[in-house]
Image (tube, rainbow, N blue to C red):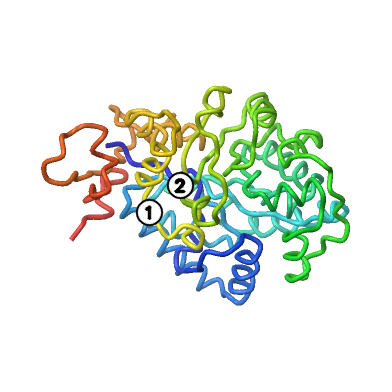
Amino acid sequence: IPGLVNAHTHLELGGLALPPSPMADWIISLVRETRAWTSTLFLSSARMGAAGALAAGVTCVGDATASGESPTAIADAGLRGVAFHEVLGLDGGRAGEILARRLAQLEQSPRYQGPLAGEPRVGLTPHAPYTTSPELYIAALEACRRRGWQAATHLAESPEETRFLREGGGDFARMHRALGSPAEHFRPPGCSPVEHLDRAGALEGIRLAVHCNQAVSGDWERLRRAGVWVCLCPGSARFFGHPQADAAGMRRAGLRLCLGTDGRASNPGVSLLAEARALGEAGSGLGAEELLRLCTLAGAEALGRAGEGVGQLRPEGVADFAVVEPPAGAPLGPEALFHPESRVVCTVTGGEVRFAAG
């Protein structure tokens, strides 16, 4: 099959395991743990994440990175993709300062002086509406437009996020206090996260919105009108006990969908095929052929890599593919890919074997 395209990962968390907990408590644990990590530890963890991706048949990723170390792991593993570098901060008055500091970190590195063969493309990810001011969203989107980069964001992921945007307070306010993050300037806009970004003029220009579990029909229309791709992560929603995104409703509304696994710290499974199976079993109305497309070509289109042949098998393409072995006796066909006992036995990128099951 074509190499799988995991449109949302956090490879730098590949070596971190956290138990399921309410999302605010999980974020507190995650931040307190990784604040002490060195760049070497982030890179080692990202290498674990990249190895896990290859073992799952993934050849291209949309990776969110806070440390900036995952692009090295992506390139060294022979993966393709886009590395979305995280920016966040709720103080709109400091948006320019925050972005300038992040861009300086990126642009001082030889990696970003120009596109190199085998390097992941560069993007920015304003983290989420509950951690990032509209001013910082707009500044990051403008920086992406000037440089030809893509932008992604976490959006409408949890009920706690929706409450924080509508009312303020709650678990996410407690989270900000526990982490000492400057949220005193935040004033709840009194609307959904999607509407909040739309009102602020910060929705247009986002290429990829991740999760959208809490998005409803009015939000879907805003996302569709802005041309935003939606990346669903069923395993992460299950980990937190969040309601699953209404994939069937999104499809009827004309939204373009793709799939991701999120990070191992919020989804110990790394199988994109298992994510697709969960989506099919959740009443999405998607057949096996459509599920396979979400795992491959749709993700490549969302990340702007389809023109190279990513996510498909074609002459003059990139020669990325995976070999999947169904269990004995299972009839060959698309349905067999999503059998719980099917396994990836080989992953190839650029015509080179990167993983072989032993």
Q: Is residue 329 left or right of residue 180?
A: left
Looking at the image, which residue sits at the far bottom? 36
Q: Which amino acid is tagged 1?
A: Ala
Precedes in sequence: disc 2 or disc 1: 1
Q: For the point 26% across and 34% down, which residue is it?
A: 335
Pointer 2 with pointer 1, Cβ within 8 A: yes
Eyeballing the image, is 310 above or below 182? above
Say whether residue 96 is visible: no
User: Disc 2 residue type?
Assistant: Val
Foreground of the two, 122 or 202: 202
Q: Residue at x 40, y 29 (%)?
A: 286
- The residue that disc 1 covers is 53
Direction left: furthest residue: 329
Check disc 2 and report the residue beneath it: 61
| Residue 159, horizontal then vertical, whole percent | 66, 49
Residue 67 position, x and y percent, is: 59, 63
Q: Quadrant of residue 249?
A: top right
Q: Residue at x 59, y 71 (%)?
A: 34
C-alpha span from label 2 to label 1: 9 Å
